Image: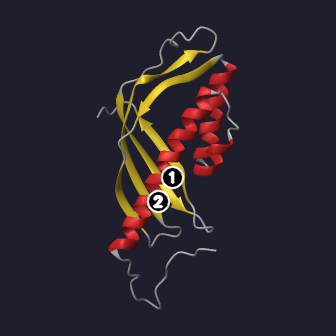
């Protein structure tokens, strides 16, 4: 079981640049996995898609599953290509649990909510390029999972 690094007494915890870079890399891999799992689950209208739980944790896991389930109940699904260009904006290995903040410019101009029967775009759904943020957290088993995220469609990038 992996535990957060701790210092002795009141001494500050020292993390090397390599530790922070490794955490950032692992968090970006989890984020990339999350986007791919989300695309696959949305394309199949499958809120229980097993790949979701490999990269997501609650509360974001439940939020994504509910969104997919609601689209399915309304006869809709997502299709197309979602482009991503994420960057790590902060690494906090002293947090309990350790976290990495990610910022992304998502390009959803070719990733649309459509009706499953005829693939026509659902009115009011929008694509475009916008800011997205996510938090990756290291869990006791050592895995980095995305447990918080938001699409800021009012903030173009």
Question: Which one is in front, 15 or 148?
Answer: 15
Residue at 70% x, 38% y: name it. Answer: 48
Taking 138 as reference, is 28 left or right?
A: left
> Could you say which disc has been placed on residue 30 in the image?
1
Disc 2 packing (10 Å; few <14; some 14–19; many ≥20):
some
Q: Which mark is residue 80?
A: none
| Residue 46 found in image quarter | top right
Whether tag 1 and tag 2 are in contact, CB under 8 A, the answer is yes
Residue at 55% x, 16% y: name it: 114
Q: Is residue 120 above or below residue 104?
A: above
Residue 116 in the image, given as x and y percentages of width and height: 62, 15
In percent of the image, x 45 and y 48: which residue is there? 134
Q: Is residue 133 above or below residue 121?
A: below
Q: Quick one: label 1, few (<14), some, or many (20+) residues within 10 Å?
A: many
Residue 45 in picture, x, y percent from top left? 65, 27
Whether residue 57 can be seen here: no
Per the model, the C-alpha gap separating discs 1 and 2 is 6 Å
Question: Helix, strand or loop at disc 1?
Answer: helix
Q: Which mark is residue 26?
A: 2
């Amino acid at each position: 079981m992996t535990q957060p690094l701790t210092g002795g007494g009141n001494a500050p915890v020292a993390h090397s640049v390599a530790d922070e870079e490794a955490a950032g890399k692992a968090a970006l891999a989890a984020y990339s996995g999350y986007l791919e799992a989300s695309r696959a689950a949305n394309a199949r209208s499958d809120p229980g898609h097993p790949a979701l739980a490999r990269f997501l944790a609650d509360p974001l896991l439940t939020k994504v599953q509910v969104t997919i389930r609601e689209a399915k109940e309304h006869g809709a699904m997502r299709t197309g290509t979602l482009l991503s260009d994420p960057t790590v904006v902060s690494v906090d290995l002293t947090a309990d649990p350790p976290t990495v903040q990610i910022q992304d410019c998502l390009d959803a101009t070719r990733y649309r909510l459509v009706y499953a029967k005829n693939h026509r775009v659902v009115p009011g759904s929008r694509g475009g390029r916008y800011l997205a943020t996510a938090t990756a957290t290291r869990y006791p088993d050592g895995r980095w999972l995305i447990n918080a995220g938001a699409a800021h469609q009012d903030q173009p990038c």
